[in-house]
Amino acid sequence: MSELPSTPLPAPFPAAGNITDADREELRRHGILMTSLEELYNWGRSNSIWPLQFGLACCAIEMIAAATARFDIARFGAEIFRPSPRQADLMIVSGTVTKKMAPQVVRLWNQMPEPKYCIAMGACAISGGPFKQGYNVLKGVDRFIPVDIYIPGCPPRPEALLHGLMELQKQIKREHLTGADAARHTRPEVPSEFPIPAYGAHDLEPTMNPAVWKPAPPLPRSGKA
Amino acid sequence: MSVSDLSSFTPSSGPTVRAVKDPFHGDLLEVSMGPQHPSTHGVFRMVVTLDGEVVVKLKPVFGYLHRNHEKIAENTTYLGSMPYTDRLDYLCSMTTNWAYALAVEKLAGQAVPDRAQYLRVILAEMTRLVNHSCLVGFLFNDLGTSFTPLLYAFREREKILDLFEALSGSRMMCNFQRFGGCRVDPTPEWLAAASRLVDNYPRFLDEYETMLTANEIMLARTQGIGILDAKLAVNAGITGPCLRASGYNYDLRKVDGYGFYPRFDFKVPLGAHGDTYDRYMMRILEMRESVKILQQAFRDLPGGPVMDPKAKIRGFRPKAGEAYGRIESPKGELGFYLISDGTPNPYRYRVRPPSLINLTLLEEMCLGHTIADSVVILGSVDIVLGEVDR
């Protein structure tokens, strides 16, 4: 700084953490950037989300399309699709999860280091989609792993994937590192790995993880039972 | 391999890499590639046994995307299966729609108006352009040119998908064909835009070929690699560009002459060696022929309705019987076999997927080559897992 601000600072100077947005804006006008470590950390994290290169079905083609020149997911810092789960921050479940594939999906999720996020892309990943009646289709990947963002569509357009990514960025920016509402990855008591289901003789064993997924309450029916 | 050995290929059992002892080769390494692997084109798994770097055994493992397509289709109406056919080969929904519509039209004895026939040819050939350009891009991904050719391919794909979206309302899952015609009639503006795109396509192909065809790494890595013998290919039921790359002249557009293909003047390119390079060249040459077909189709497109006015949409019940409809999809012979018992649902519904049947000789093509080559060979076969596993 070459010269001090001509206007006096608001007195008394607010204590760190107590500063209001108006104060911060005032300081920024004078070339002083005040931020918290938490904010800086979340800003950096949210703008370099590396997804796992992991295509399951039709939606994977739209995921690739989102990475190509027209949609260019690189604008959001998420163009580096990592083939290894150890290097990835985000799992985009892009397509139908079958019962044969579900153990692998959960294993890949377990292999990803925290902080990690999951986007369920497309109707199949959300609920089984058009194939829900099928005997071999998992009725939503959220039965086994926690999902942060759901993107409906069959398949969702690349713009929808970008929108989902932006929503995830907003979610990451809202996360706290300390306090009662601290983010998942800062709390060691919150599990980051989940039991891998076995591909049994008739169905997955277990068919869902009760720690992650609760069945929806039955819809109230009007009239006769 | 005996049946009891199959238990070792269940997805969750055993390590992904293990040492095996072979009485003939000595110490070998068994590596499980996939189902999550960047170069297996989806959720395909190959259990490869390696002697050093050379493949001595390769077992494909399918079923990670088995979505019960056939069973669902047997429990829904004929028309209700049309959106599901989009999701079989999700790069080419227009051709899969056509194959299914063709089978049902055969079953019901349904006529198709001339304009719809032309429109189907136009859409199928545009789909071929999309599929082949993307396939070449993916093939080069497997060769190690991280993403660049694919960016060019997807640039062109987006242009065609914009047209598909304008026509059908959806980019990928077009759900466009109906029994007895097509769903909507394209506007003159759409036809002009499509015709312009097709006229510009050879320029893209020239650009693409300048980069790729004579590329030194491409030549070194693909010529003489993954040779498929024509006799073996015929015996295994391989169809499509893979068969023609081996020099066997079999193209359903000529053999069956379905739709209005006999009215068009085009050549069927044939390979000479049946190696990966020929399979690549086959795609490029087919795209050039597709452009010729499309130009003829835009020139000769007749007027009239796109839907047979007598076609039944609701309450559609073909009389009892069976039919097999097949077309030359970009991947090979795509067929639908249907048995009707007079009810609104098919009694039996069976898909003949070219991707799955073309995969059956993967081991023969890969034996004796390095594991890096087997990835390229798989890329040149052109599979879509939605169709392989259904």
Image (spheres, coloured by chain):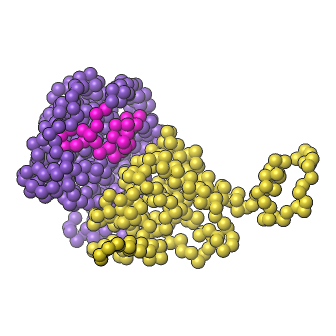
Chain colours: A yellow, B purple
Q: Name the residue at 27% across, 70% down.
A: B7
Viewer-nearest residue: B23 or A224:
A224
Residue B305 at x, y percent in the picture: 21, 32
Which region of the structure is painted magenta? B159-186
> Does the magenta portion include B120?
no
With respect to residue B114, does B227 lie above or below? below
Q: Residue placed farthest to the top in the image?
A: B299
Viewer-nearest residue: B18 or B290:
B290
Q: How many marks?
A: 0
Image quarter where the C terminus of chain B lies is bottom left
Residue A130 at x, y percent in the picture: 32, 58
Residue A165 in sight: yes
**Left-right relation of A66 to A97:** right
Give the quarter of the image for residue B198. Answer: top left
Q: Name the residue at 33% across, 26% down.
A: B188
Q: Name the residue at 16% across, 45% down.
A: B312
Viewer-nearest residue: B109 or B204:
B109
**Left-right relation of B342 to B296:** left
With respect to residue A184, does B334 lie above or below? above
With respect to residue B162, does B201 lie above or below? above
Residue A114 at x, y percent in the picture: 57, 66
Give the quarter of the image for residue B68. Answer: bottom left
**Left-right relation of A203 to B265:** right
> Does the magenta portion include B175?
yes
Image quarter where the N terminus of chain B lies is bottom left
Viewer-nearest residue: A110 or B227:
A110
Q: Residue placed farthest to the front in the image?
A: A223
Residue B193 at x, y percent in the picture: 38, 27
**Left-right relation of A213 to B253:** right
Residue B136 in sight: no
Q: Name the residue at 61% across, 60% down.
A: A172
